Amino acid sequence: GFRFRQTIDEYYKKEIIRLLKLALPFNPATRDDQPVCNLMQLTMEISDNEIHIIDFKEFIEEMPTFPGCEDQPIGQEKTACANKKMLAFIYSILQCPSDALENNISGTSVVRFTIDADGNIQNPYIVKKLGYGCDEEALFVVEQLPRFNPGIQWGEFVSIQFNLPIKFNCN
């Protein structure tokens, strides 16, 4: 269900819930292929009869992490360590495609995928295209990622959807 932190007009409440059900293309955290409860925070502004989404966050007890930082305590240190190792891995194999080099392309391609309860990458696809062969290269790189430490919700390993921006500077 939905809970609102501030009191708002019933019309807007119903409209927000209707829009959320239509517009949010996310896969919930799962355990044994069944959705599990997770918390989400949506920050929005209502003005002049318009609803503007400002921020959306999904809260998971422990997000999946790139391997190599298992000795770090859970929290910001572990996340920072894992992100640093993941970026080092990505940029060690990422190459600028010839079309991108010829056209001096810089920008970001975003890959969405699921890290399953075993830590495997599943169903990667592009959600923000850059073109010039960069999207295909971004998918290739994601497919090379090693098995992650899976996400945890309510003490159980769960599948978590992940968005990964990959920056290209092909000048």
Image: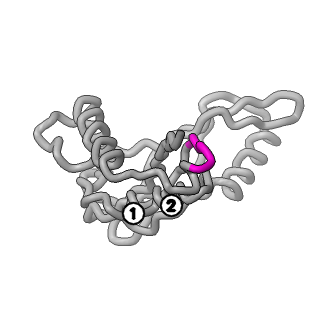
User: Residue 107, relative to residue 121: is it above or below?
Assistant: above
Instruction: Give the secondary structure at mark 1.
Output: strand
- Residue drawn at x 30%, y 47% is 92
Residue 118 placed where, x, y %? Answer: 26, 65
- Residue drawn at x 29%, y 42% is 88
- Specify the quadrant of the image occupied by residue 42: top right
Which labelled disc corresponds to residue 27?
Answer: 2
* Residue furthest bottom as drawn: 33
Mark 2 crowd level (few <14, some 14–19, many ≥20, 10 Å Cα) = few
* Residue furthest left as drawn: 71
Which labelled disc corresponds to residue 30?
Answer: 1
Hey, what amino acid is under mark 1?
Thr
**In the picture provided, is 10 more to the left or to the right than 165?**
right
Instruction: Give the secondary structure at mark 2.
Output: loop
What range is drawn magenta here?
A: 102-107
Spatial CA span between label 1 and label 2:
8 Å
**In the picture provided, is 138 more to the left or to the right than 103?**
left
Asked whether the beta carbons under mark 1 and mark 2 sit within 8 Å of each other, the answer is: yes
